[in-house]
Image (cartoon, helix red, strand yellow):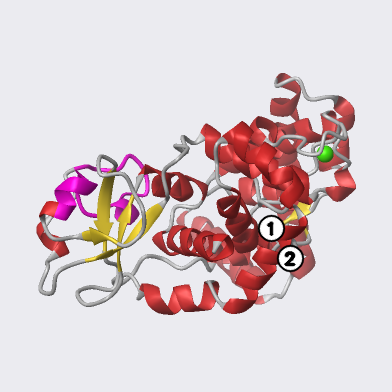
Amino acid sequence: MISLSKFSTLRIVALATCLALLPLPSMRADAQQESFSAYLQLVAAHARRDGVSEAAITGTLAGLTPNQRVIDLDNSQPGSRGGPPPMAPYIARHVGSSIVSRGRARYVSMAAMLPRIEQRYGVPAPILFAIWGHETNFGSYTGDFDLARSLATLAWEGRRRDLFEGELIALMKMIDRGVPRSTLKGSWAGAFGYPQFLPSVYLRLAVDGDGDGRTDIFDPADAIASIANYFRDAGWRPGQPWGVRAAVPSGFNVDAYPTKLTAPSCEKVHARHSQWKTVSEWRALGVSPLAPIGNDVLVSLFQPDGPGTPAYLLTGNYRVILQYNCSNYYAMSVGLLADEIAR
Ligand SMILES: [Ca+2]
């Protein structure tokens, strides 16, 4: 018995070794496809439970295969090792003269509709154009990944299954609302259109800006109105800037005023800003805003590159930009680009 058992074990080991040595791409691909197809069955059941039509389920999922490129891109996202890189080079790259002039040209070409948008949503148009410019260079690159395939791959891969499965089902609901499946292309991570909304954001906040009866965020008017709706929903306060450049006395130590709050999400981004004080309180400490801002507005001080470099007083509206994309580099360059477009 013992020898037989040993023999069996050896055979199994030998067989496993052979299998490991053999290049069997087709077998692996088959196994992968089987696991993927089984997962899509589960997604279909969840979509059905959520009231998605059979036509939209089939139209979204039929024939899908996992996209290895999406998995590779997801795995190659930079971690947060080391300290934050300097801000100034990022700003120089992202708020250069060519994007500013394109932004101004777009702004001028759509000037007729902008007062209505600003009035309705309470968000200054230059901020909307800065988002559009940053997300897709005013629509010149929106991504050509099939959104259903990207979202299904990311959900199947499993690291953030709840998030991406929810977005995949939201995509099916867009199809049920009449958005053609063939137009649903975007970034590898599932964002699409000029504002790079995820499907759930489209369902919740995209609006028909030009009143033609379709909500198409590959259309400038609809995209601008939809970004404005996003910002209003996220709590943009009309009449306040996102922030202003500030002069600080020489030798002033921003680090002496660390924040007392712990942000509920993306804590590291918020932890780089000082505690909140009114503009008057900062003035009393020798900090002077270099653009108009009310004395009673609550602001935090941010000097991203340290003593002797540009400093900014940031309002709650800066936090609204962070809700769109939680990165100080992103939010600072959106704010500064908006200022340049408005100039
Ligand atoms: Ca429209």
**Residue 249 figure quarter:** bottom left
Q: Three-letter amino acid code at disc 2?
A: Tyr
* Observer-nearest of 271 and 52: 271
Q: Which is more N-terminal, label 1 or label 2? A: 1
Image disc number at residue 107: 1
Residue 27: % across, % down:
76, 62
In this rendering, the label closer to the viewer, 2 or 1: 1
- Position of residue 252 relative to residue 186, above or below, is below
Left or right of 236 on screen, residue 8: right
Q: Mark 1: give few (<14), some (14-19) or many (20+) Cα within 10 Å.
A: many
The location of residue 131, given as percent across then percent down, is: 59, 55
Rendered residue at 87%/43% (across/down): 181
Q: Is mark 1 within 8 Å of ligand 1?
A: no
Q: Which residue position is annotated with label 2?
A: 141
Side of 129 where 232 appears, left or right: left
10 Å crowding of disc 2: few (<14), some (14-19), many (20+):
few
Ligand 1 is found in the corner quadrant, namely top right
Q: Residue at x 11, y 56 (%)?
A: 285
Region in magenta: 261-283
Residue 99: where, in percent of width, then height? 63, 71
Which is nearer the eye, 112 or 213? 112
User: Within the magenta stretch, is there residue 340?
Assistant: no
